[in-house]
Amino acid sequence: MEQLKAVVIGIFEDLTPDAYRRLDGDLDGALERFINASPKSKEFKVLTMIPNIDFDSFKVAYVVGLGKSTDYNLNRLREVVAHTAKQVRFDSDLLLDSFCKSNNPCENCVVAAQEAILLAQYERPDFKTKNNEKKPFSNVEIVTQADFSIALARGTMHAQGTNLARDLFNLPGNKLNATQLAKTVSDFASENGLECQIIEKDEMQERGMGGLLGVNQGSNEPPKMIVVKYMGNPNDSELTALVGKGVTYDTGGYNLKPGGSMYGMHGDMGGAATVFGAFTSIVEQKLPVNVLLVIPSTDNVVSADSIKPGDVLHMMNGMTVEVCNTDAEGRLILADALTLANELGAAKIIDAATLTGAIARAIGDEITGSFTNNADFLATFTKAAETCGEHIWELPIIKEYEKIVRETPVADLNNAPTSGPGAITAAAFLKEFAGDTPWIHLDIAGSSETTKPHALGPKGATGAMVRTIIRYFENS
């Protein structure tokens, strides 16, 4: 039986691109007659199938409403293409020229549309023993008049990096511990000829990584400090570090989480997944930048050996920390990772972490909280986020809150002050270890996961900030 194939064309309420006119002419006015009879088909995201056409290899046409051109932007393009990719029932060629206001799409439109298709059709890993007979998505390919093959490849790699981060985040804790995460990263490094070092527990003790060792005290699983270097521009000495929190399961330790908050804590390595997902795309695109990947990884569980509230840890940079809350473990392992990044010559640092529930309470779960010690660095990064349609909002680290993390009678720092805004005091703690190196901290505790399906994917991990990090390096 012949496999039906569809052509997909976008239609504005108040604009008629040349691509639409050309196709309508080839179809002897069939599109215009159909639309005149169905005026609502121009409304945003309305998808209508026209069967029984005869145009080249196409037997079916879809028209997709784009709404008013005055409301249309890159984010609306992503949304409508993603919706289409999930809804069409036949393998389709999407005529992207008709989805753009001008006669030819810009490079950003091509990248965004390709991202949208692959992100929208993402399916999370599952371990069901029976096929649930869910109908697979149809294959949707972008077609343009001009050659945008490079932009299409970029969009593909952006989405693949994001979906890799989603996969890692979505894996249960017994399917991804620190050892397995280290192997995943080292395998990628080996496949791409990159320098990789997995720092084991004995060496951590020699180097005084008291934060990571302290969090790991109660575990049967050994901790890992994962380090990979990519030198895409060996003639440039500048090295930017990507640091990601890799807590593969977080019970809270002796400050035990309540049952309702315990479920899903395999995702507490979302920061590690984010920076690794971005790193893979940077490497595979062979971007002319130098990137240091640093991932501290362990679980945070309860045993007789676990750290206790009131314990004092000696950190890699020589500072001491009073552990006032064992559930504030992410900042402890990140502290040693930031110190290591500086020691290895990072000129800039971006860290990502599912760090605080306070950030979601402050700005919701659609926005990533950002903090910095360098306004120009964050301004450049924020422009990349705007292009990607990822929401980011800066919160301030003021001196009054920096003082709060130093309020302890027995150590240099307090890992979890009971006063002050939690997301900001957590960032102020990390700032002590970033030092003078230009640094951005991304708190993705809210934005890294969603409890319901959304335009660019199903419920579960979102892969927030992966595309923004990639875009930042593309623009560098």
Image (tube, rainbow, N blue to C red):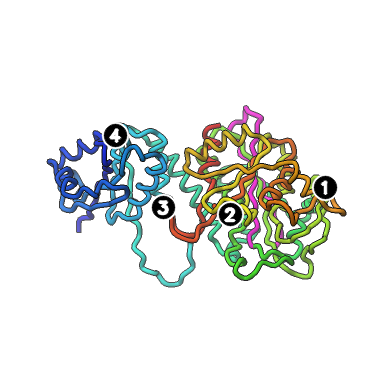
Secondary structure category for the residue under label 2: helix
In the image, residue 229 lies at what x, y percent? 64, 41
For discs 4 and 3, the disc positioned in front in the rendered view: 3
Number of dots carrying numbers: 4
Q: Residues within 10 Å of mark 4 (few under 14, many from 20)?
A: few
Q: Residues within 10 Å of mark 1 (few under 14, many from 20)?
A: some
- Picture quarter with the N terminus: bottom left
Q: Which of marks 3 and 1 is nearer the N terminus?
A: 1
| Residue at x 58% of width, y 34% of height | 379
Q: What residue type is labelled 4?
A: Gln
In the image, residue 402 lies at what x, y percent? 75, 44
Q: Which amino acid does label 2 sit on?
A: Ala
- Residue 123 visible: no
For discs 2 and 3, the disc positioned in front in the rendered view: 2
Secondary structure category for the residue under label 1: loop
For discs 2 and 4, the disc positioned in front in the rendered view: 2
Q: Which amino acid does label 3 sit on?
A: Ala
Q: Which of marks 2 and 1 is nearer the N terminus?
A: 1
Left-right relation of 286 to 150: right
Which residue is labeled 3 in the image? Answer: 455
Marks 1 and 4, Cα distance to the nearest angstrom?
60 Å
Marks 2 and 1, Cα distance to the nearest angstrom?
30 Å
Part of the protein shown in magenta: 221-249
Q: Which of marks 2 and 4 is nearer the N terminus?
A: 4
In the image, residue 398 lies at what x, y percent? 71, 41
Which residue is labeled 1 in the image? Answer: 319
